[in-house]
Amino acid sequence: MENANVKPTDSSFCRIMKPIYLVSKLAGLWPQSYLRASPGVTVLDIAYLLVLYAMFFFFILVNSNAKLWDYYMQPFESDILRYGLQTHLVNGLFLGVISVTINVVQYKKKWDYMELLDSLTKVVEQEFHVRYPVRVVQTFIIFIIGCEVAYLVVILGGYYYLIDRTLNITTKYLYASYYMMNISLLALINEHNYFTIHIRRLFMIVNRLLKQLLLGDCCSNDTVLLNQNRKSKTPTIAYDEIFTIYGRGGQKFAETDGGGMVKRNGPPKVTMVAPASAEFNKLSTTTVYTTYITQLKIDSNSSMDTILKTVNRLSVLHYHLCDAIRMVNRITSMSLMFHFGAMFVFLVFGLFTIYKAFKSGSWIFQIMAMANGAWIAFYIAAILSVITATTATQNSGRQTGDIVHQIIRKHQNNFSTDVIEKLSTLSLQVKMRDMSFSCGLFNFDWSLFGSILSAMAMYLVFLIQFDVSPPIGLNSSNLTIPSIEVIDFGV
């Protein structure tokens, strides 16, 4: 893939976002066009949303029928399991309606987010000489989405074989309801995770560019240059020498053996720019998460004015990335919070099904336990993917402060007062800006996962106690009334 053949107005973010956008639009989570400059919300978009609403409400009414669920759960003879699964399914369908409605209401915020991330990506590509393996990342995303949909189909096929064929229960409405509920969940999680991962990628670029200020340590393993081993390289004029050529150049400083900075006079310095290496188009997880920097803007020959401008530009990028996190919270956090609650309900009753299978030893419960075990793995993977993405992004944003302090400690006697002051301001900015992914009630981090596990254990114990406790009442066969001896107190 050659970026020279790509239109200048198309950033890597917009091209990589296409598969995510199409899946979200299919699930009704993107009721408008891709960008604000395009037609916007069309008549076909409105008609498709109305069809989705009709399908959701139809399946809600179907699954609210008590007789239908009596028919589904007749072989199991467990009211706890019946009410738990019915509640999970009906709530999931309602959440699909809520998610679509939330995205309809805040469609302009998605446009704002797309414009912000598109602008930030263009800045790092054009000003800081960063390249992305767009085709590789697109293929990787399509592969992940394909695996998710295939797993969903396999689970539904498992339900059909295990329940429909073995228990002779017709569950066509059940399959369609589960599909409607989970396709919106998949689209929401994919959208949130890619938004989050791209913010993390930009944070990593800011960190790598800041590490150039370490000068002697700038070419460490954290900075990936394109084809460093190429034999013949084409010299180009460095970015910070352009103003010097046209007569507006500031003074250049070079680092002496004594550690001081002296005035540099002479011809403009030349940097080496290499073409893409063979790894750039290789489909692998390493390539997907790798940032390729084609040219370093800062070295020991850069002027204080160039360093100050670079630090200021990176500070602005970091500031807007924190704004992007805030916008992601506004766009997806409420829907994600509701879906986490629905997944928690199913995890509790799914584990209860596994308990019943071990306790009773009945093959009927074993069949249901196998089906629910597949759903448990599906929902836990969804929760872990969200928490992993948000935690990694927050850690990358916080890492900027550590890099800034390393620069200050190493070069506080070499850099000018303005540069040190700007680095200190950037450190304070990193400390004060909120980088947490939150819905307002809790953060999407590992502490949330620990809370989910502890709550699952507690509610599972409650369900087991309700299941094993004997019935209470005069009509119970297990109730025995002790004989009462009448004592004569008369003399």
Image (cartoon, grey):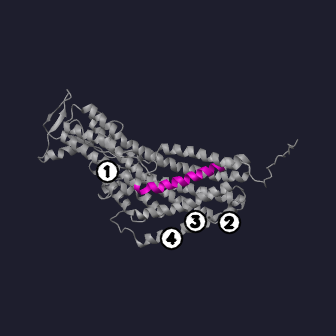
Amino acid carrying mark 1 in the image = His
Q: For residue 343: magenta?
A: yes
Task: Tell me, for residue 67, which label it has, or none.
Answer: 2
Return the disc, 1 or 3, that comes first in the chain's sequence: 3
Tell me how far mark 3 sits from mark 4, CA to CA. Answer: 14 Å
Report the magenta residues as a range.
Answer: 330-352
User: Which secondary structure, mark 3?
Assistant: helix
Tag 4 secondary structure: helix
The one nearer the camera, 268 or 436, is 436
* Quadrant housing the C terminus: top right
Residue pointed to by mark 1: 320
Please report the residue visible at 70 percent of the width from the left and 55 percent of the height from the top: 78
Q: N-terminal of the two: label 2 or label 4?
A: 4
Local crowd size for mark 1, using a 10 Å CA cut-off: few (<14), some (14–19), many (≥20): some
Mark-to-mark CA distance, 1 and 2: 54 Å
C-alpha distance separating marks 3 and 2: 14 Å
Q: Nearer the viewer, residue 441 or 448?
A: 441
Answer whether labels 1 and 3 touch (C-beta < 8 Å): no
Q: Mark 2: which secondary structure?
A: helix
- Give the labeled residue for mark 3: 60
- Of residues 364 and 254, which is closer to you in this image? 364
